[in-house]
Amino acid sequence: MASGASENAAAASREAFAAWVDEAPEGRAFAQVLVRKVESGYEIRHMDDADAEGMDFHDDPRAAREISRLTEAGEHRPLKSAPNLRRGWSLRAADARELSVAINYLYPAAIVHWRMEREGKLEVTSYRENAARQSGIYKRVQRLSDEGVQNAARACCEDSVCLKTVRWDVDAETPLAMDRGEGEIPCPEPCSLFVAFARRARLFEREERERDAAGLTPSEREDLAALVEAAADGETTFAREAEFEEPRNERRIRYRRLTLVSRLRNGE
Ligand code: SF4
């Protein structure tokens, strides 16, 4: 898209977004934030702080960049649409332009995608199309089976781990069979975090021929041992969000629940 056209699209999106907020006296929920029209412009805060007082106040929309960087526990947030936005702040935006600056730091590209979807113009890229463009160490995601893509999407993209609503499919003939989410922000294409997880899922698939007498692959055995040890030590926190090589990674555990638990229970 020419830069003039993309500037026009951005301007139209921010005006549409501000108008959508203006229409709602109680404000609008957008992923984890509440956006309200106030006398001096717009106010943005965490949904769970809707009625809280004594918040850290910011009147520069660029403060959203720092707010979105770390979780409450001080960990890096590689996926801005993960439901781990910290609380305790409120942001003032003077007008539609400042509002879009703040929202774009909190949820990059969300306003443009939101508007495109409302106008029926959101361009969607399937998993297979996205995978065909990968190179280097990510090229192997092209070999992930359809079932692997389905399980990776359920592990990575449902609302409990990502608040975007999944619009892409495995390919044109193979829809994702999952709870796609209910939020306002559409996801038109597998993100880089998802592709990294797909690579890990493909590594799991490659172990299929190495199952032991109990039917476990080497990494399944390793994960079970690590999780039992962690539980015995009272370790209840997840590993970092993008550390998929860690047995205690939340998405990895969700994937194991899908691919391993029924086999364990049924003794297969
Ligand atoms: S691919 Fe999945 S994890 Fe990534 S932004 Fe989309 S819905 Fe979220």
Image (tube, helix red, strand yellow):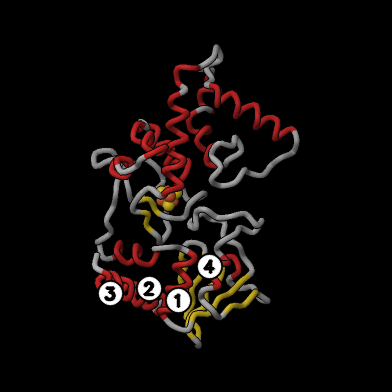
| Secondary structure of residue under mark 4 | helix
Q: Are discs 4 and 2 less than 8 Å apart at CB?
A: no
Q: Is residue 265 visible?
A: no
**Looking at numbered disc 1 in the image, what kind of residue is underneath it?**
Leu
**Looking at numbered disc 2 in the image, what kind of residue is underneath it?**
Phe
The residue nearer to you, when weighing 172 against 37, is 172
How far apart, in angstroms, are the residues tagged by discs 2 and 1? 9 Å
Mark 2, ligand 1, within 8 Å: the answer is: no
**Residue 99, numbered label:** 1
Q: Which residue is mark 2?
A: 17
| Secondary structure of residue under mark 2 | helix
Outermost residue, right side: 233
**Residue 216, numbered label:** none
Earlier in the chain: of badge 2 and badge 1, it is 2
Q: Are discs 2 and 1 less than 8 Å apart at CB?
A: yes
| Secondary structure of residue under mark 3 | helix
Q: Nearer the viewer, mark 2 or mark 1?
A: 1
Q: Are discs 4 and 1 less than 8 Å apart at CB?
A: no
How far apart, in angstroms, are the residues tagged by discs 4 and 2? 19 Å
Earlier in the chain: of badge 3 and badge 2, it is 3
Earlier in the chain: of badge 4 and badge 1, it is 4
Q: Which residue is mark 3?
A: 8
Q: Position of residue 89 (x, y in %)?
A: 61, 71
Q: Position of residue 188 (x, y in %)?
A: 33, 53
How far apart, in angstroms, are the residues tagged by discs 4 and 1? 13 Å
**Residue 65, numbered label:** 4
**Looking at numbered disc 3 in the image, what kind of residue is underneath it?**
Asn
- Residue at 54 percent of width and 28 percent of height: 261
Please indicate whether residue 252 sits to the left or right of residue 122 in the image: right
